Image: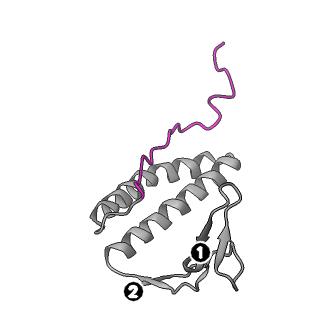
Amino acid sequence: MSAILKTKPLHGSSAASGREVSASTGSVGDVSSLTAESVPVALVGDRLLAFQSLQLLMRLDRELLKARSQWNQDWFRRLMRIRPRAVRRLSRRWERLTPTPSIRLGTLRRRYHANLACYLYDTRP
């Protein structure tokens, strides 16, 4: 199984000249390589696994936002119990990539409290 990533070319200059003038420095740079058509990239092996685990983590974070906005504590709690496993999976697969990606993964920690409304109400008598 492989994933195909489709990329769009950048359009920042006229296609006829292939050159762009920088407004700040007034220098002319060749951007023809930036405006060229890009080819789809097929991911295989460890890169495919890292891509899939990154997609899983992003989907979990999106669901967390939905659960929090709907004040659904059970849904939120279940997602927060699953999330550390997805983070470990992503970091493990990210470390296995060769060559090492130029972008560091960084910290993926999230603060967790089972009660979403704990900071809104003072429970002291």
Tell me, yes or no, whether the highlighted magenta stretch contains residue 59.
no
Tell me, yes or no, whether the highlighted magenta stretch contains residue 120.
yes
Image quarter of the C terminus: top right
Of the numbered discs 2 and 1, the one sitting upstream in the chain is: 2
Provide the secondary structure element on which disc 2 rests: loop
Task: Give coordinates of residue 62: x percent, y percent.
Answer: 60, 58
Amino acid identity at mark 2: Met
What residue sits 35% from the left and 60% below the top? 89
Q: Determine crowd level at label 2: few under 14, some 14-19, many 20+ residues with C-alpha closer than 10 A.
A: few
User: Which numbered tag is attached to residue 31?
Assistant: 1
Q: Is residue 46 left or right of residue 6?
A: left
Colouring used for the render:
one colour
Magenta residues, as a range?
103-125
Task: Give coordinates of residue 96: x percent, y percent.
Answer: 27, 65
Which of 103/51 is in front? 103
Q: Is residue 7 depicted above or below 98 in this figure?
A: below
